[in-house]
Image: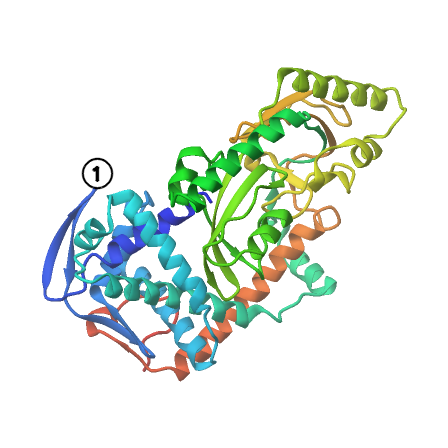
Amino acid sequence: MNLNFMKPIYNYLLIILFSTTYGYSQEIENTNFKTKIKIDGVSAVVGDYVILESDVDKTLIDLQSQGVSTQNITRCSLLGKLMEDKLYAHHAEQDSLQVDSNSIYSYVDRTIDYFVDQIGSLEKVLEFYKKNDEQVFRSELFEINKVRQLSELMQNKIVEEIEITPDEVRQFFYSIPKYERPVFGAELELAQIVINPEVSEEEEKKVIRRLETIKNDIVVNGSSFATKAILYSQDPGSRSTGGMYTLNRNRPTMHKEFRDAVYRLREGEVSDPFETESGWHIAKVEKIRGQEVDARHILLIPEITNEAIVDAKRTIDLIRKRIIDGELSFSDAAKELSDEVETKSNGGVLINPTTGDTRFELTKMDPVLYSQAQRIKDNEISMPLLDEDQRGLKKYKIIKVSNRFDEHIADYSKDFIKIKELALKEKQLKRIQSWMIEKIEDTYININKDNQDCNFTNKWVKN
């Protein structure tokens, strides 16, 4: 698992946990700025939650540490955002919304692992955050993430039943003056056919024997699975964390073969070698937390011979020729001959992972895919392209631009799906604003007199 996703929360927690006492000023230096945190009392109270003056300062520093421009961000706007978060969390508890404690504990474990990886040891982490006790540190992390999850649950509940009709979409679109209608960037629809080089039986057996040797060293000799993963695993996403992944039975993210192998294991048990599309694995279950399973794995990828790569190139050349000669359509060739499971069933059409539809906006495309597709004319088939992913796996593919949409002002018929998304978001926003007005009126809120002159977006100061 790539831990880049943890960097924002790491920065946030670094600031939030730096101190928990009051009555002094502390100077914090960063390569880009120097400032002082004034920790001097309560800024506001929202329901059961207290917001300290220091929380506002810490949030500002957090944004600066992430490179966000704070030139036009005021303390008042930051306080208003913190109050919104606390209002959501307060009413989530009032409505008996339940957080997934197991997932939060698991997230805390991964957060601490990340801190240790950044700083060097748990002792140094505790010293850095001025915490004398690991359990207190974990409790504070738990509470921070609990509030975040409660806030998300409440926001989801507010808008979960909101739907939008075609007539509402039409009214939304035509209510926008022509000169204010959104401009959609140039987009492409793409399809591809992929041929993977075949792995020889000898190379497969070599990898299996290697994994069996590693397993024996772990099970019989007591070697560390995590250390073996760091040394030998070819999975760049999890190697640095000792092969660790957290699987959730309700939110499957891994290959089915991987999930099936892991879910059959008991805590502490190491699997036999098993195969997925990525290669060959052994796995060990570290902890079972209800619907979540913390597991480590070691991935080894059989070596692909030059001869196999040449054969794959020869195969895709032949497929391309058959399509150009009219013997096969691109769609039929993808369904019958492509090795890419994710796309072959729909004729090779690529799905945009960000939007879930088939269009790729040029300015937001993956740079590699953009470089491959930008020179291809409509309905033209590219020459065979050799792809290599970060694990070193090679494959040949051909690409076709199925449709091209130039930059244009939003058109109701052509862009209905995008317009529907905008209309739905506006309807959800109005519902949230209505909920906010209602709950602010019904909730105990007290704002420090020094902050009552703030020009808040919401009416936090009651008459």
| Residue 162: x %, y % from top left | 62, 69
| Residue 187 image position (x, y, % from top left) | 65, 36
Furthest residue toward right: 327
Q: Nearer the viewer, residue 136 or 207?
A: 207
Question: For this view, does 441 lie left or right of residue 302?
Answer: left
Q: Residue at x 36, y 70 (%)?
A: 86
Identify the secondary structure beneath mark 1.
loop
Q: Quadrant of residue 383?
A: top right
Circle 1 crowding by C-alpha within 10 Å: few under 14, some 14–19, many from 20: few
Task: State the residue at coordinates (80%, 37%).
Answer: 335
Q: Which residue is mark 1?
A: 31
Residue found at the very far left of the displayed protein: 24
Residue 453 seen: yes
Which one is in front, 352 or 423? Answer: 352
Comparing 354 with 262, the one in front is 262
- Figure check: 450 above or below 109: below
Query: Is residue 355 in sight in this rendering?
Result: no
Counting from the top left corner in percent of width and height, residue 251 is at 57, 58
- Residue 385, relative to residue 51: is it above or below? above
Residue at 50% of width from left, 61% of height from top? 292
Q: Along the horizontal axis of the image, is 195 left or right of 185?
A: right
| x and y percentages locating residue 12 in the rendered image | 31, 54
Quadrant location, the C terminus: bottom left
Q: Nearer the viewer, residue 61 or 463?
A: 61
Q: Is residue 56 left or right of residue 339?
A: left
Task: Kindly identify the amino acid type of the residue bearing the numbered disc 1.
Answer: Thr
